Amino acid sequence: MDLGLTGKRALITGASRGIGRAIAETLADEGCALAICARGEEALREAAGELRARGVTVYDAVVDVADGAALAAFVHEARDRLGGLDVVVANASAGGGLSGPEQWATSFQTDLLAFVRLADAANDALVRSKGALIAVATTSASDTAPPSGPGSYGAIKAALIHHAAALSRSLAPRGVRVNIVSPGPIEFPGGSWERRRHDKPEFYESIRSRIPKGRLGRPEEVAAAVVFLASPVASFCVGTNLVVDGGFLSRVPF
């Protein structure tokens, strides 16, 4: 299927590794020019070089998305360098971890407020291009069983989903589609689930056994969902939360 993305311009945050990098790679293979950012310079430069080797234009910048001014500057520079923006993907996340006040503040800044700022900074460009905004959330937003628990990650991502869905209704009349992709447990080299597989094998196995597919997901499987929703093929998807979890959630998705 031709997704109609050839020649489009896409921005992805947190794109140096894992899901973000897979999204960038998939968009590159679909013919998109890219703007990518991440906090770690070495991994970002490596990712940018490999993406350029796929034959696409890549603008890369070291950015902490919790820094509102830096994030807005990155979006505006990306828009200018690429000549506009058709796709914006909010992927950067503080991840899980401890549930103390500092982690809550970090999750709020990195997962929720960064999306608010990203949407605001990219708004005019996306309205001009009739583009797409995608938020990467998590199944932890709708499940309090392990590995979610009473921490900041799931709660803040639940707020992200709510805001993105509300934003989708306000932006759709202006031609901008906003959607969400919620991955379940996803494993990749250097990621948190690979570490758990080695450090906490019993916990890892307890999660794996809950997934009907019999394994954890892969970044490219999440990327495929993101790129579909970002494409003109998904032109009637507005405010959708597409779950990519191998059947991990047991709720009925009415």
Image (spheres, rainbow, N blue to C red):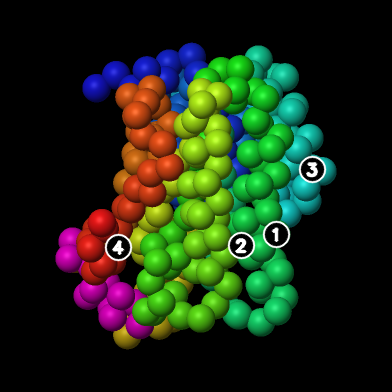
State which mark lies toward you, 1 or 3: 1
Q: Earlier in the sequence, mark 4 or mark 2?
A: 2
> Left or right: where does residue 252 sit relative to residue 12?
left
Please report whichever mark, 4 or 1, sits nearer to the chain's N-terminal start.
1
- Which residue position holds label 2? 94
Asked if residue 207 is among those painted magenta in the image, a careful observer would answer: yes
Q: Amino acid at mark 2?
A: Ala
| Left or right of residue 172, residue 220 in this image | left
The disc placed on residue 90 is: none
How crowded is the residue under tag 2: few (<14 C-alpha within 10 Å), some, or many (20+)? some
- Residue at mark 2 to residue at mark 1: CA–CA distance: 9 Å
- The amino acid sitting under disc 1 is Gln
Q: Is residue 249 magenta?
A: no
Q: Earlier in the sequence, mark 3 or mark 2?
A: 3
Q: What crowding class fits label 3: few (fewer than 14 Cα within 10 Å), some (14-19), or many (20 or more)?
A: some
Quadrant of the drawing holding the N terminus: top left
Q: Which mark is residue 70?
A: 3
> Closest to the observer: 106 or 62?
106
Crowd class of label 4 (few under 14; some 14 to 19; many from 20; radius 10 Å): many
Q: Find the distance from the CA under tag 4 to the CA under tag 3.
A: 34 Å
Which element carries disc 3, helix, strand or loop? helix
Task: Say the numbered circle drawn on residue 109.
Answer: 1
Pointer 2 or 1: first along the chain: 2
Residue to which mark 4 is pinned: 216
